[in-house]
Amino acid sequence: MRIGTVTGSVWATRKANCLAGQRFLVVDTLGGVLVAADHVGAGKGDRVLLVMGEPAARFSMEAPVDAAVVAILDPEGKHVGA
């Protein structure tokens, strides 16, 4: 898993049928910039948790993706109810 910050989104006028309905975000991580499938409705400036490789494809219904956003991190580093 990695932590990153959403810096934008990617738009495609055409894409493979297996990617229909997928939203893609540009995420800046310590390892560099990457494109990730969004599963939580993250937006620009959000700190997010990413999964990579096979787990990312599973979150994306077996679509051929290498990274998936699976959580938006609390900006204060605190959780509700603590």
Image: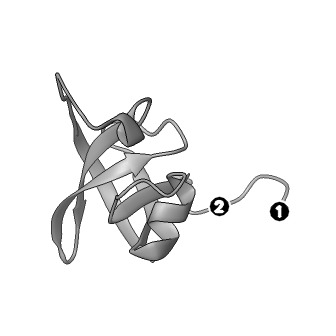
Residue type at mark 2 is Lys
**Marks 2/1: CA–CA distance:** 8 Å
Residue 2, position as x, y percentages in the image: 39, 74
* Mark 2 Cα-neighbour bin, 10 Å: few <14, some 14–19, many ≥20: few
Compared to residue 72, the image places residue 66 above or below, namely below
Count of labels shown? 2
Q: SS of the residue at dot 2?
A: loop
Seen from the viewer's position, the closer of residues 68 and 7 is 68
Q: Could you tell whether 31 is left or right of 38 in the image?
A: left
Residue at image mark 1: 82
Position of the N terminus, as image quadrant, is bottom left
Residue 29, position as x, y percentages in the image: 24, 68
Residue 18, position as x, y percentages in the image: 40, 42
Residue 72, position as x, y percentages in the image: 52, 51
Can residue 67 be seen from the camera position used here?
yes
Residue type at mark 1 is Ala
Residue at image mark 2: 78
Q: Could you tell whether 33 is left or right of 17 in the image?
A: left
Q: SS of the residue at dot 1?
A: loop
Extreme residue toward the top, this view: 13
Seen from the viewer's position, the closer of residues 49 and 14 is 14
Position of the C terminus, as image quadrant, is bottom right
Which residue occupies 40% across, 31% down? 20
